[in-house]
Each structure stands twice: as structure tokens, then as C-alpha cells.
């Protein structure tokens, strides 16, 4: 569990929400004392529909360049 001051929480709320979505729990403090806690909302996990996933990936065009070569090209072309 992490602690952040109220002032830092105000300044970095979007980042804190991202961290909470990723599983962190964050206590917000005022004058060093915890006053609030950010936690993720409990949501049931949804099952992945394998048939829909297969249909989606089958509909995607094959890439002409492999991932490693693509990243190298982006790096070399300063497109990252």
C-alpha cells in the first residue's frame, strides 16, 4: 500500500487512478495522517469468448514485417 499527500493526489490524480486500476491501493494523507483510501471497484472478470477472439484475429491482415524489425524501423526513423 502506498501513501501520498492530499496535495500530491490533487496534482497526480490520473496517475493514481491508473495505478489503482492496475491493483494498487493508495492512502491519501493530510498532515501525515491517512484520511482516505483509493481502491479499485470490484468487478467480476468476464470470460473471453474464444470464438469471437478467433474471428477477430482471423480478420486481421498479416503484417509484412515482424515485430522486432518493425520496432527497429521505428527507432531508426525516429518515430517512437
Image (cartoon, helix red, strand yellow):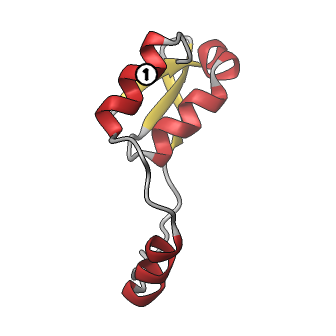
Residue position marked by numbered label 1 in the rendering: 73
Measuring 66% from the left and 13% from the top, which residue is drawn there? Answer: 7
Left or right of 40, for residue 71:
left
Q: Nearer the viewer, residue 69 or 36?
A: 69
Residue at far left of view:
68
Where residue 19 sits: x, y (%)?
A: 47, 36
Q: Residues within 10 Å of mark 1 (few under 14, many from 20)?
A: some
Residue 51 image point, x, y percent: 41, 89
- Measured as percent of width and height from the top left, residue 58 is found at 45, 76
Q: Residue furthest front?
A: 64
Quarter holding the N terminus?
Answer: top left
Residue 63 versus residue 19 in the image, above or below: below
Query: Most extreme residue toward the right, as rendered?
Result: 10
Query: Does 51 sit left or right of 79 as displayed?
Result: left
Position in image of residue 11 (x %, y %): 68, 16
Q: Secondary structure at mark 1?
A: helix
Query: What residue is drawn where x is 52% and y is 74%?
Result: 59
Q: How many marks?
A: 1
Q: Residue at x 42, y 86 (%)?
A: 49
Asked which quadrant contains residue 17, the reply is top right
Front residue of this view, candidates 35 and 65: 65
Residue 56's place in the image compared with 33, above or below, is below
| Above or below, 56 relative to 14 | below
Left or right of 7 on screen, residue 80: left
Amino acid at each position: 500500500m502506498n501513501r501520498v499527500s492530499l496535495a500530491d493526489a490533487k496534482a497526480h490524480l490520473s496517475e493514481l487512478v491508473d495505478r489503482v486500476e492496475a491493483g494498487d491501493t493508495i492512502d491519501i494523507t493530510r498532515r501525515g495522517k491517512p484520511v482516505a483510501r483509493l481502491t479499485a471497484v470490484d468487478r467480476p472478470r468476464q470470460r473471453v469468448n474464444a470464438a469471437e477472439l478467433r474471428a477477430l484475429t482471423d480478420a486481421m491482415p498479416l503484417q509484412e514485417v515482424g515485430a522486432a524489425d518493425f520496432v527497429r524501423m521505428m527507432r531508426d526513423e525516429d518515430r517512437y
